Image: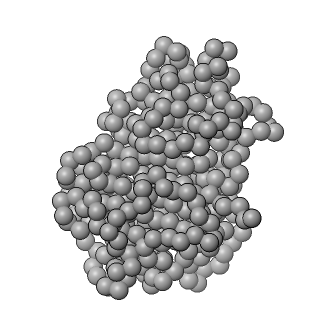
Amino acid sequence: MKPVKTSPACCADQPAVNRRSFVAALAAASSALVLPGRAVQAGLFSGPSRTSAAETAVSEFYGSLTDEQKKVLCLPFDHAHRSRISANWHVTEPTLGQTFYTSQQREMVGRIIKGLCSEEGHERLTRQMDEDAGGLHEFSVALFGVPGDESQPFEFMLTGRHLTLRADGNTVDRAAFGGPIVYGHDQVDPVASKNIYFYQTQQTDAVFRSLTESQVSAALLDNAPAEAAVQLQGEQGTFPGICVGKLSDEQKLQVEKTLAVLLAPYRREDTDEVMEILKESGGLDRLHMAFYRAGDLGGDRTWDIWRVEGPSFVWHYRGAPHVHAYINIGQVKKA
């Protein structure tokens, strides 16, 4: 097994995520993964609810809207915009910095975003919004459905440069994060470590460097799929790269740590739902990991484009020339 290479200069911005902290933060969720010697447990999880912190702020925000604001911001739940994903678009025209919104409403949106993140994730997200767009005031929001209607699903969506976030109170059935989300960072410097999400690539690189030569031949591919090609394929899907189920126990622990690193920026309620969905679609062993030669910044063979995918899970990370990441995790309904 090849030694894992790390770079002290690159690790300075990496949050402290290790095996112990992962178990502490996601103890119930990690126990549901199908790993050697572990029992699969059922009924451990609950996703966000209508009374979660972010969703409570969504209801407060909705209640503050005037009739004129509702005409612009409130859309039917089945509106096409709710299903759209892009690394740079606005779900509605007014940005939060415009006089269309009151200062109190901007504060409510800030609380919604904070409620969707872990503490570290919110700090990183705030930096990303500041550096990529000039701050939260350059982003747009929309409400699909009616948050106060207990019989109907609803969703809050925030969009802008390199960001799509959702809050749905778990009313969108079996869809983690309420549906596909996006993050990124507009760092075009050839030194990839300067982007604020490079620590995620460092962790996937740890998996890659643990692979044997024969495993590398399955995991390392030439060109990646389109970055927004994150449709869930279900049990009959075909996935690029190496199957995690074919890795050693030690290698699987690196993959498990990778999931912890990827999920660390988000609130516990959403990550619990991710792990439940993953468990129900076969666990860690059904995932594949692929690394792509294209876009190798600096020619250092730390692959800047990679993908983790399984029947109910897609995490596509394009780190070159700058970061675009598309995530879609949800249970595919059987015919």
Q: How many numbered marks, from 0 up?
A: 0
At x 50%, y 70%, the residue is 239
Res 277 quadrant in image: bottom right
Of 44 and 231, the residue lying toward us? 231
Please state, as top left, top right, bottom left or bottom right, where the C terminus lies in the image.
bottom right
Q: Is residue 134 above or below residue 151?
A: above
Camera sees residue 104: yes
Residue 62, image x and y in percent? 66, 25
Q: Which residue extends farthest right?
A: 151
At x 51%, y 44%, the residue is 85
Res 97 quadrant in image: top left
Residue 284, image x and y in percent? 54, 73
Q: Is residue 176 above or below residue 206?
A: above
Camera sees residue 205: no
Res 297 quadrant in image: bottom left
Of 61 and 31, the residue lying toward us? 61
Of 51 and 143, the residue lying toward us? 143
Residue 247, image x and y in percent? 45, 82
Q: Is residue 68 above or below residue 224?
A: above
Residue 180, image x and y in percent? 55, 49
Please state, as top left, top right, bottom left or bottom right, where the N terminus lies in the image.
bottom left
Of 141 and 113, the residue lying toward us? 141
At x 27%, y 45%, the residue is 187
Give the side of residue 128 with respect to residue 115, left or right: left
